[in-house]
Every structure is written in C-alpha cells, then in structure tokens.
C-alpha cells in the first residue's frame, strides 16, 4: 500500500475517499475475514461482522489520529466487533459467551466452509476451553502469525503479557490434546 499517511489523507478527503476506501477493502477484506472467523468461528457470522467492521472503519476514519498503524486500528475495530457480536448473541440467548462459543463449535463440522478434520476439531475444542484473552492471543499468533508488537497495539496489552498468555495457552492446549 502507498505511504500510510498519504493513504489516510486519501481516505479522509471526500474527493478521493471512495477509491481509497475500495483499495482499503481490497487489501484488508481477506485477512480481516480470517481474523474475525477465528473469533466467531461461523462463516455467515464472520461475513456480518466483517461488514460491520468496514462500516465502523468508514464511519470513524475522520477520528483516526495516526497514533497507531492503520492495520492495528482496523484490527482493533474488527476484534471488538467480533467480541461484541458474541456477547450480544449470549445476552439474547441468556447464556455466557463461552456457552455461545461451545454451541458454535458443536455446529462447526456441519459448516460447509469448515474443512477441518478430527485433529482440527480437537484443537478448536482445546482453544474453546481457554479464557477469552488467551483464545485471542493464541489465534492471532498461531493462525494469523501477527507479531506481538502489532498484537499489543490491537489488544492494548504489553508484549510481555501477550508472550506469557501465548505460552500459557499453548501449554493448556498441549495438555488438552494429550489427555483427550
């Protein structure tokens, strides 16, 4: 992508905004979809959250101060939208967000967009047993290979805490897979 500051100017300028936003969507659509899908697990839900994410990005671009990278800012919005989606579904159904994730996981094998095997399902079950923050850190590092420094900006957590969370999550997953 072009120089980020120039690109942000294009995103904010009414004359260049539409073309710049189309470019932003092209560049971020697939990785953001994967990021959101790792959190909400379901394809249709991920599409809905992705659409909401781009709406929020467009809505709040004028407020972007450039204190973090555009990538980090957009990923933070996507992460918050995905978590809000799960929490709202939990609230509507009168259950915890953990229970929502468990129900989604139970339906994952019938999802035509999920091509995992038995080992992948075991890994998903292990991840589902982690606390929310450890789930996020593990998925962002393991599946998306996001650097700790970028993750720190996205999640607002220190690099050291993220490394510790990933290590603890990895150990818990390893133990779960060995015993199940």
Image (cartoon, rainbow, N blue to C red):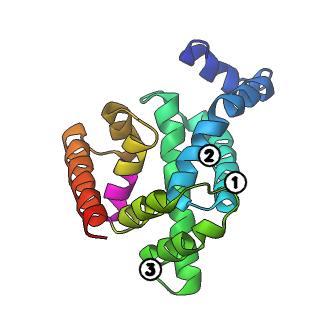
Q: Which part of the image, by quadrant, shows the C terminus?
A: bottom left
**Mark sitting on residue 21:** none
Q: Secondary structure at mark 3?
A: loop
Q: Secondary structure at mark 2?
A: helix
| 106 or 24: nearer the viewer | 106
Which quadrant holds residue 19?
A: top right
1 or 2: tag closer to the N-terminus: 2
Callout in the foreground (2, 3): 2
| 176 or 3: nearer the viewer | 176
Classify residue 17 as left or right of residue 53.
right
Q: Is residue 62 above or below residue 4?
A: below
Q: How far apart are the alpha carbons under marks 1 and 2?
A: 7 Å
**Residue 117, position as x, y percentages in the image:** 53, 58
Which quadrant holds residue 17?
A: top right
2 or 3: tag closer to the N-terminus: 2
- For label 2, the residue is 33
Answer few, some or many: residues within 10 Å of disc 1's Cα (few below 14, many 20 plus, some between 14 and 19): some
**Residue 38, position as x, y percentages in the image:** 51, 53
Which quadrant holds residue 104?
A: bottom right
Residue contact between numbered discs 1 and 2, judged by CB atoms under 8 Å: yes
| 141 or 178: nearer the viewer | 178
Magenta-span inclusion, residue 108: no
Classify residue 11 as left or right of residue 172.
right
Q: Is residue 150 above or below residue 176?
A: above
Q: How far apart are the alpha carbons under marks 2 and 3?
A: 24 Å
- For label 1, the residue is 47
- For label 3, the residue is 96
Q: Is residue 79 above or below residue 16?
A: below
Part of the protein shown in magenta: 130-137
* Type of secondary structure dominating the magenta stretch: helix
Q: Residue at x 79, y 29 (%)?
A: 18
């Amino acid at each position: 992508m072009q120089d980020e500051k120039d690109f942000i100017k294009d995103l904010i300028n009414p004359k260049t905004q539409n073309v710049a936003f189309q470019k932003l969507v092209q560049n971020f659509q697939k990785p953001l979809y994967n990021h959101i899908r790792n959190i909400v697990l379901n394809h249709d839900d991920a599409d809905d959250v992705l659409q909401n994410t781009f709406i929020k990005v467009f809505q709040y671009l004028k407020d972007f101060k450039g204190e973090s990278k555009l990538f980090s800012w957009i990923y933070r919005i996507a992460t918050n939208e995905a978590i809000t989606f799960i929490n709202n579904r939990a609230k509507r159904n009168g259950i915890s967000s953990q229970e929502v994730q468990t129900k989604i996981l139970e339906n994952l094998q019938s999802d035509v967009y999920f091509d995992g095997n038995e080992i992948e399902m075991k890994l998903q079950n292990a991840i589902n047993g982690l606390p929310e923050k450890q789930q996020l850190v593990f998925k962002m590092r393991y599946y998306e290979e996001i650097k700790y420094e970028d993750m720190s900006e996205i999640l607002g957590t220190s690099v050291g805490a993220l490394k510790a969370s990933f290590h603890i999550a990895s150990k818990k997953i390893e133990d779960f897979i060995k015993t199940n």
